[in-house]
Image: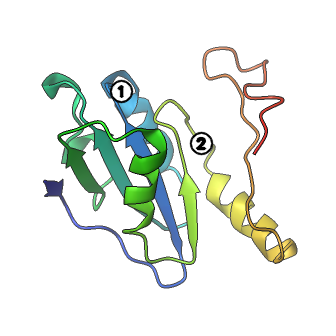
Amino acid sequence: MTDGAPLTHSGGVGVVIVTFNSRRYFARLKAALSQQTEPFALYVVDNASAAEQRPGADDFPAGALIVQLEENIGFAAANNRAAALCDGEFIALLNPDAFPAPDWLVELLEAAARWPGAAAFGSTQIAADTPERYDGLGDCY
């Protein structure tokens, strides 16, 4: 089942979010996504959340494509499922408990333009509940 229609931007960015019982983050995530200064298409895949935790069209900015899975296929497979739907030049993966700054996508696109040979970029992660602390330091890709 899907709700809405994806935003399409030629050469743009597809933002992919995989959710699993993540409703507590939706309002803050929607607010952060609504403040982005770069246009994007939004693809949300719900990985078989409990019925009351499943996302709906009102939980995300207008035009989000929401795919509801009836079986939890795992985080990586759900990201791949959403990525297969993206038709833009770039795909940005975003966790449901990450609340990007308004210039998040602009900064990533500027980095991609400066280093066109790079295959991937990562964002600085700051703990949402403790903004003076970095989150994810030491992660390896």
In front of the other: label 2 or label 1? 1
Q: Which residue is drawn at 44% across and 37% down?
A: 29
Q: In this view, does 42 lie above or below 11?
A: above
The total of numbered circles placed on residues is: 2
Q: Left of 78 or right of it: where is 57?
A: left
Q: Is residue 99 above or below residue 35?
A: above
Q: Quadrant of residue 20?
A: top left
Q: Quadrant of residue 89?
A: bottom right
**Label 1 is placed on what type of residue?**
Ser
Q: Left of 102 or right of it: where is 73?
A: left
Q: In which quarter of the image is the C terminus?
A: top right
Q: Which of 39 and 92 is in front in this view?
A: 92
**Label 2 is placed on what type of residue?**
Pro
Q: Left of 38 or right of it: where is 52?
A: left
Q: Which residue is drawn at 79% across and 39% down?
A: 140
Local secondary structure at mark 2: loop
Query: Where in the figure is residue 98, as x and y percent of width and height?
Result: 55, 34
Q: Which mark sits nearer the N-terminus, 2 or 1?
A: 1
Is the residue under label 1 in contact with that under label 2 (CB below 8 Å)? no
Query: Where in the figure is residue 8, as x and y percent of width and height?
Result: 38, 76
Q: Nearer the viewer, residue 81 or 62?
A: 81
Circle 1 is placed at which residue position?
22
Residue 100 disc label: 2
Local secondary structure at mark 1: loop
